[in-house]
Amino acid sequence: MIGPVRVLVVEDDVRMAAALRRGLRAEAIVADVAGTGEEAVRRARTGTFDVVVLDVMLPEVDGFEVCRRLRETGVWVPVIMLTARDAVEDRVRGLDAGADDYLTKPFSLAELLARLRALVRRGPVERPSVLEVGALRLDPATRQAWRGDAEIELSAREFAVFEAFMRRPGQVLSHGQLLDAAWDLGYEQRSNVVEIGTQAHVDEQPGGHQHDDRRQGEERGQAHPDGQAAHGRPPSLRSR
């Protein structure tokens, strides 16, 4: 883990909660436990947690509602949802409620730890419904992007990389942050895919002038395998 990490485990099954707490503490992670949705909302609002591990099937207030309440009140701590239900609609519902990741039971502790590391590296990120930086707009819900009034055509991975930049205006993102944003943990070529994939340039604005808003991320897009960010450019934007 990256420095001291504190996790809130929200799980009503006493044995499962105890097992998660033991496994996390064995990795030097401070783990607090909440047994109900109401308790989870209260503690997440008042405590300082790096990640919330949130079970979906909670009594009275379920995990979806817990996550929704946290986001509505401006609590942007990263949330991993745990569920025994593997239906696509359940995963979509959790992500739409504001969750950052989704893990289906049964799962290995190693996988949970890997996902925790990724979220701790990223940290809390506010997620407004539409991201705006200068003339650029992204709607994560509909997967649409615009430069001014012109819609931009992006692949799924290009969209994810660009979203990562726009959620952190003015920041230089590391190689690891870009991997976590756009490439799955199981992707076989994660080691060098970022430096290969972020070489393309942004289309010029009509009239031949480069788009000024690329300082938000486009000149900061390249990252090296050693984890240090360098100047580069993100995926090309193709207006349609």
Image (cartoon, rainbow, N blue to C red):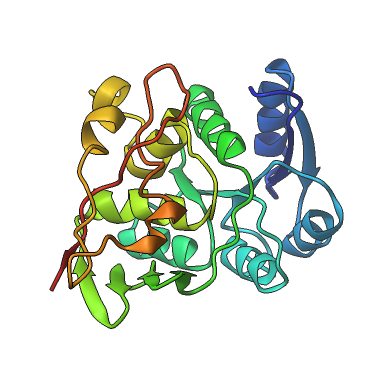
Q: Which image quarter is the C terminus in?
A: bottom left
- Say which of 4 and 20 sits in front: 4
Task: Residue at the far bottom: name it.
Answer: 149
Q: Position of residue 186 (x, y in %)?
A: 30, 29
Residue nearer the viewer, 67 or 192: 192
Q: Looking at the picture, tell me which residue is in the foreground, 125 or 80.
A: 125
**Does residue 112 appear to the left or right of 73 in the view shown?**
left
Seen as rendered, the residue at the extreme left is 240
In the figure, is residue 149 to the left or right of 171?
left
What residue appears at the point 80 percent right and 39 percent down from the top-left corner? 32
Quarter of the figure with the N terminus: top right
Q: Residue at x 41, y 43 (%)?
A: 181
Q: Nearer the viewer, residue 98 or 54?
A: 98
Q: Position of residue 86 (x, y in %)?
A: 36, 52
Q: Residue furthest right?
A: 46
> Which of the 4 image quarters holds residue 171?
top right
Marker count (numbered): 0
Q: Is residue 29 above or below residue 143?
A: above
Q: Is residue 14 above or below residue 66?
A: above
Asked where in the image residue 33 lies, by quadrant, the reply is top right
Q: Is residue 83 visible?
A: no
Above or below, 215 against 96 in this view is above
Task: Say left or right for 81 vs 155.
Answer: right
Q: Quadrant of residue 25?
A: top right
Residue depicted at x 76% and y 62%: 41
Give how far across and how far down residue 19 sits, in percent. 67, 28
Residue 135 in the figure: left or right of residue 237:
right
Image spot of residue 109 (x, y percent): 54, 25
Residue 211 showing in the rendered view:
yes
